[in-house]
C-alpha cells in the first residue's frame, strides 16, 4: 500500500495523512495487486502523479510493473489519489503528419492494454526501402517481421 506522513523535521514528530492508505489493493478481484513503493512526481501543466509498482492479477510471475496514478493536493496539504482506469494504457501522442519518404519516419509505438489482440499491417513499398513490425516485451522476448522491396 501507499501511505504518507509529514514532519517539519526529518527527526519527527511525524503526522500521518488522514487519507491513509492513499493507494492499496482492497480485493482479490482487482486487476493490480501489491500496489506500493510510490514516488510523487509533478508532470506537465503542474499535474501530480504517483509512480509506483504492482503485480497484475494472474501475472505475478512477470514481476512488478510500473504504474502511474493521478493525485491532487487537497486544501490541508495532503495528497489524495484520483483513482483512474488502470486497465487502459495511457494514450500515446499522435504523429503530426504521415511519413512522406523513406528516411523521415521514426518508429511508431502503440501500447496495448489487453493481453490478447490482433494486428494487421498494410505496406506499400516503392524504391529501395524496407518495412516491418516488431512485437516487443523486453530485451530478451520479442518477435519481428520485415519486408524489403
Image (cartoon, rainbow, N blue to C red):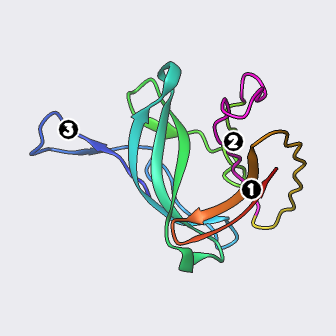
Please identify the residue farthest to the top as the structure is shown. Answer: 45
Mark in front: 2 vs 1: 1
Quadrant housing residue 108: top right
**Mark carried by residue 7:** 3
In this view, 122 is above or below 42: below
Mark in front: 3 vs 2: 2
Residue at 64%, 72% (x, y): give it.
57
The front one of 97 and 115 is: 97
Please identify the residue farthest to the left as the structure is shown. Answer: 11
Local SS, label 1: strand
**Mark carried by residue 108:** 2
Residue at 67%, 45% (x, y): give it.
109
**Spot occupied by residue 127 in the image (x, y as percentages of width and height):** 81, 39
Q: Which residues are magenta?
A: 95-114
Quadrant housing residue 75: top left
Q: Where does the N terminus fall, quadrant-wise?
A: bottom left
Crowding at dot 2, Cα within 10 Å, few <14 / some 14-19 / many 20+, comes out as few
Crowding at dot 1, Cα within 10 Å, few <14 / some 14-19 / many 20+, comes out as some
77 relative to 115 in the view: left or right: left
**Spot occupied by residue 80 in the image (x, y as percentages of width and height):** 49, 38
**For the residues marked 3 and 1, what is the alpha-carbon distance in whole angstroms?**
52 Å
Mark in front: 3 vs 1: 1
**For the residues marked 2 and 1, what is the alpha-carbon distance in whole angstroms?**
10 Å
In this view, 112 is above or below 117: above
Crowding at dot 3, Cα within 10 Å, few <14 / some 14-19 / many 20+, comes out as few
The front one of 130 and 78 is: 130
Residue at 35%, 46% (x, y): give it.
4
Q: Which residue is mark 1?
A: 133
Q: Is 77 a magenta residue?
A: no
Q: Is 98 a magenta residue?
A: yes
**First-in-chain label (3 vs 2):** 3
Amino acid at each position: 500500500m501507499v501511505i504518507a506522513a509529514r514532519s517539519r523535521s526529518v527527526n519527527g514528530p511525524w503526522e500521518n495523512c488522514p487519507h491513509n492508505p492513499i493507494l492499496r489493493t482492497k480485493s482479490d478481484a482487482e486487476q493490480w495487486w501489491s500496489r506500493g513503493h510510490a514516488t510523487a512526481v509533478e508532470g506537465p501543466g503542474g499535474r501530480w502523479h504517483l509512480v509506483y509498482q504492482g503485480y497484475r492479477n494472474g501475472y505475478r510471475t512477470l514481476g512488478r510493473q510500473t504504474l502511474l496514478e493521478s493525485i491532487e493536493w487537497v486544501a490541508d496539504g495532503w495528497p489524495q489519489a484520483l483513482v483512474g482506469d488502470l486497465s487502459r494504457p495511457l494514450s500515446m501522442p499522435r504523429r503530426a503528419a504521415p511519413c512522406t519518404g523513406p528516411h523521415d519516419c521514426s518508429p511508431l509505438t502503440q501500447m496495448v492494454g489487453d493481453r490478447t489482440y490482433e494486428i494487421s499491417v498494410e505496406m506499400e513499398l516503392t524504391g529501395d526501402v524496407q518495412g516491418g513490425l516488431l512485437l516487443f516485451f523486453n530485451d530478451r522476448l520479442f518477435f519481428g517481421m520485415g519486408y524489403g522491396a
